[in-house]
Amino acid sequence: MKVAVKREYFGCFIALLVVLSGCFRVSGGGEYKGPPIRPQALTNYYASSGSYGNYSANLVEQKKRFNRYHIVVSTPAGPVSIEYFKNHQESDNLVFVFPVLGGKNIIENHLASYFADRGIDSAVVLRNNEFKDPSRFDSLEQIFRKNVLSDRFAIDFFEQEFHKKHFGSFGISRGAINVAMTAGIDPRLKYNIMALGGTDIPDLFRDSNQKRIKKYVASVMAEKKISEDKFYKVLRAEIKTAPENTAQYIDARNALLILAVFDKTVPFEYGLRLRKQMGYPDTIFLVADHYTGLLYTQTASIIPPRLGPGYFPFPYIEQEAMSFYRRKFKLGSNWRLLPYKIIQTPVNLAAEAFFSVGDGLLRMVGEGSYQRKVRAPGFWEKAPLYEQ
């Protein structure tokens, strides 16, 4: 009885700390030795048929520490539009911030501005919304592949025109899925942060509570006159450009995941699956769902109408990202997080013990038998090549 009471108090104490800290962190797998070698067939599948051509660059905004340019690059995959946030100090480094779903890119522009204002050049590769068009369902693989090619041409462009040598990426939600694809395909994207993302796209579509996804599925079923089972069967057969086929090739030692434990839009389970596929990178768990997770940034406010502050009195996700990039780009330490890390320490130690390098929570949500997906050697050889 005495032991049970102590355990109960201990559990309450940890729960209280989690609530007060708002999140906890679990370090990467100690036995991880690096990603598998990318198959040559994968490289061939995403190879471009030529180099980029002419480009235009227009100054659209001037800030104290950086300028913002709108760039359009002509490529064999079509025009690639980029918002480039360039710090006034020259640098070899660049972080790509991948968009959520297109539109006004409020979150992406906030993050890109934040990084550039603090000395790290950033760029947003703009997307159109064609993948959300139910009439383009039969072309989803071509659309996703084209997005990856656009990203690769953007990397080519910044290497050649701005002499960038070191690349990172940041993506939230759909942007995180984009990171898990492009960074898995192109090794030049070396330092990668994925927030509120997931893997196993067909199952994620099925289990997401997002109304737009459910409406999309219903529209495709009506237009194609197919059942729901047929929809997911076709999706599984056709989609090759997806995290479940690419994320394993990202080096988990140079990656950071940020997941929301109450996420049902990109269900938390699928974030855990992504973590396992990648080999257990360092992971931050937010006590939030998909949308309240934005309160850990200063893109959303709990005191409208002014943007910021969010849940924290400081931009937590932005500061974690800056800490990650400064460390990876060898720019020094980010001491602003130190007080908060001290507060987090008891929670993190308890989480480390619980996770046992990654499996504890998977067992808790019923995914204990889930295996890290490593595609058979012949998978990419069987993938069809599309005309660009």
Image: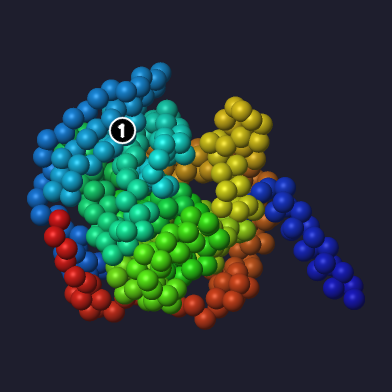
Residue 248: image location, x then y, percent: 36, 67
Residue 171 appears left or right of 240? right
Residue 150: image location, x then y, percent: 24, 48
Label total for image: 1
Residue 265: image location, x then y, percent: 54, 58
Q: Tell me which residue sits at (23%, 45%) in the image.
A: 155
Q: Amino acid at mark 1?
A: Tyr
Q: Residues within 10 Å of mark 1 (few under 14, many from 20)?
A: many
113 and 13: which is toward the camera = 113
Confirm whether residue 130 shows in the render: yes
Q: In this rendering, is residue 308 above or below 6?
A: above
9 and 370: which is toward the camera = 370
Confirm whether residue 275 shows in the render: no
Q: Tell me which residue sits at (31%, 42%) in the image.
A: 125
Q: Tell me which residue sits at (47%, 43%) in the image.
A: 321
User: Residue 72 sits in which quadrant?
Assistant: top left
Colour theme: rainbow
Residue 263 appears left or right of 243? right
Q: Tell me which residue sits at (55%, 78%) in the image.
A: 368
Q: In this rendering, is residue 248 above or below 256?
A: below
Please state, as top left, top right, bottom left or bottom right, where the N terminus lies in the image: bottom right
Residue under circle 1?
A: 84
275 and 97: which is toward the camera = 97
Residue 186: image location, x then y, percent: 26, 56
